[in-house]
Image (cartoon, rainbow, N blue to C red):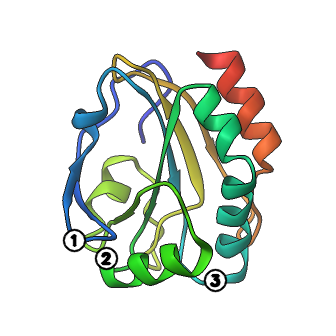
């Protein structure tokens, strides 16, 4: 598992529009990787609604949110449209990204986890949900962002 203070593993994934996106293309920006188990599941849906409610607060802090799940880009596209999500949703269909970050569950999907990566590509904060079916409140994530950048 990756730790705070270490370089964030780079990756390439398809976004909801089937376009390749790499973490390295965001170098120079602060990035919040928001891993979620499944699009359209109740908790994940609420989680992304919260991100949308607080989207301007993340933007004002200079944070680029990247949502990541093992769903296909087709599912990510439908999920994004259904909630009018502003941030990119990346498909980790191969589960490679979840493996790199050490959060792939034995069941084949990622833990709900958050990694804050600074402009230099260093992990400044991580939080992995220990209880399945729960999410971290966005206010806690915003406070962590403020404290760690």
Q: Mark 1 — residue?
A: 18
* CB contact under 8 Å: marks 1 and 2: yes
Q: Secondary structure at mark 1?
A: loop
Task: Determine the residue positioned at 41% across, 76% down.
Answer: 76
Q: CA gap, disc 1 to disc 2?
A: 6 Å
Q: Is residue 36 left or right of residue 120?
A: right
Measured as percent of width and height from the top left, residue 36 is found at 55, 64
Q: Which mark is residue 73?
A: 2
Q: Along the polypeptide, which appears first: circle 1 or circle 3? A: 1
Measured as percent of width and height from the top left, residue 51 is found at 67, 54
Characterize the local packing of mark 2: few (<14), some (14-19) or many (20 or more) Cα atoms within 10 angstroms: many
Q: CA gap, disc 3 to disc 2?
A: 16 Å
Q: Along the polypeptide, which appears first: circle 1 or circle 2? A: 1
Characterize the local packing of mark 1: few (<14), some (14-19) or many (20 or more) Cα atoms within 10 angstroms: some
Q: Mark 3 — residue?
A: 41
Q: Is residue 105 left or right of residue 127?
A: left
Give the camera-side residue of 49 and 38.
Answer: 49
Q: Nearer the viewer, mark 3 or mark 2?
A: 2
* Image quadrant where one finds the N terminus: top left
Q: Nearer the viewer, mark 1 or mark 3?
A: 1
Q: Is residue 86 above or below residue 40?
A: above
- Give the image quarter of residue 143: top right
* CB contact under 8 Å: marks 3 and 2: no
Q: Secondary structure at mark 3?
A: loop
Q: Secondary structure at mark 2?
A: helix
Task: Determine the residue positioned at 75% across, 54% down.
Answer: 53
């Amino acid at each position: 598992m990756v730790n705070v203070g270490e370089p964030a593993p780079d990756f390439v994934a398809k976004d909801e529009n089937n376009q390749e996106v790499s973490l390295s293309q965001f170098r120079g920006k602060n990035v919040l990787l928001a891993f979620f188990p499944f699009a359209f599941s109740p908790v994940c849906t609420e989680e992304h609604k919260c991100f949308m409610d607080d989207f301007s607060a993340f933007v004002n802090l200079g944070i680029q949110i990247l949502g990541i799940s093992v769903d296909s880009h087709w599912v990510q596209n439908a999920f994004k449209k259904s909630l009018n999500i502003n941030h990119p949703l990346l498909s980790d269909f191969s589960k490679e990204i979840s493996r790199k970050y050490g959060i792939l569950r034995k069941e084949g999907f990622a833990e709900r986890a958050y990694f804050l990566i600074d402009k230099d590509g260093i992990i400044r904060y991580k939080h992995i949900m220990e209880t399945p079916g729960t999410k971290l409140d966005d206010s806690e994530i915003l406070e962590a962002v403020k404290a760690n950048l």
